[in-house]
Amino acid sequence: MELTEILCMLDSAHGPSGDEGDIRAVIQQLARPWADEITSDVMGNLVARKKGSGPKVMFAAHMDSIGFIVTHIEKEGFLRVGKLGGISPKDVLNTPVRFKNGVRGVLVAEEKVEDKLKLEDCYIDIGARDEEQARSLVQVGDTAVYDTAVTEVNGRVISPYLDDRIACAILLKAMEQVGPCENDLYFVFTVQEEVGTRGAKTAAWSVDPDYGIAVDVTDVDDTPGSGKYGTCKLGRGAAVKVMDSSVICHPEVVKALEQCAQDKGIAVQRDIIRAGGTDAGPIHVTRTGVRTGGISIPCRYIHTPTEMADLSDVQSCVDLTVAFAHAKL
């Protein structure tokens, strides 16, 4: 299955933080042919293992997405919502959304708002005539996600939730391609990353890996007015994480990833971001500590309904994941 086809399947599945059941089921189905065993834990993390006799290597990609949760239903039938994860209202105005049960709507701002927009100034319109009809369609506590399409443009993909469904697709392709391996591999699809990297904490404790690699998107420095928040550029290859606000990567892992890239002719660049963290944060401080690094996908417009990544970078991330899986550690 082509990577973009996998991405479309993942994007069509519901899975905001705390409500990952649908996306977990899709990933489990896709991972089953390539895993020796698949388990899940109380938090909802999915662990697909390819058994080996060597060191334990844990690759983590979070399967949850940011989203909205209904807090109030007004008498006119409009929905007030809270946010699951980091959402900037100005980035999502007039965006179509969908609920788990298929109900669709659009996020809109009140007309009176002129500046300093807050989510409290917005509502979701599902076309209900009144509160009674709205309550027949959704309930307080129901969650909604972006309902925008996956599009390919000039070798790049525009999609909602590349953060972090593109990394889930990368791990699935790596599982398919890695073949027999000496290292003991754990491909972990974590929950609740967007609300505090919660799933990775319990998953890493359970797996107790020797090495941990967080696979996630990273901010870029290649758009007008980018502000130098990241170091990466689209089209320059997979990004080897050095640091973010949650982790300073273990120098041995940074060196090993870059050596794998050099040996296999994989295009790479270095990833440092000023703000934001990944599952690497809780992984590296698990138990007595884990040698931890990251494979990052350069991504524009993170947390908007139209994130963008370069497909050549994505392929480089697949190749680097496979190469590290086989590394002599």
Image (cartoon, rainbow, N blue to C red):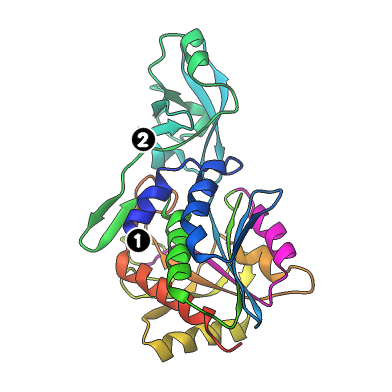
Q: Position of residue 201 (x, y in %)?
A: 70, 59
Tell me, yes or no, whether the highlighted magenta stretch contains residue 197.
yes
> Seen from this angle, which residue lies furthest right?
288
Q: Secondary structure at mark 2?
A: loop
In this rendering, would 252 be left or right of 268? right
* Numbered label attached to residue 61: none
Q: Nearer the viewer, mark 1 or mark 2?
A: 1
Residue 111 position by quadrant: top left
User: Split into 4 quadrants, where in the image is the N terminus?
Assistant: bottom left
Q: In the rendered image, which residue does mark 1 sit on?
A: 3
Q: Which residue is rendered at x = 38% and y = 55% of the image?
A: 6
**Kind of residue indicated by mark 2:** Thr
The 10 Å Cα crowd at callout 2, few under 14, some 14 to 19, many 20 or more, is some
Tell me, yes or no, whether the highlighted magenta stretch contains residue 89.
no
When the figure is inspected, residue 163 is found, relative to residue 86, above or below; the finding is below
Real-space Cα separation, disc 1 to disc 2, in angstroms: 26 Å
Q: Position of residue 208 (x, y in %)?
A: 73, 70
Q: Position of residue 71 (x, y in %)?
A: 59, 25
In this rendering, would 45 be left or right of 92? right
Q: Position of residue 72 (x, y in %)?
A: 57, 20
Q: In the rendered image, which residue does mark 2 sit on?
A: 95
Q: Which residue is rendered at x = 52% and y = 83% of the image?
A: 326
Q: Magenta stretch?
A: 195-221
In this rendering, would 147 be left or right of 252? left
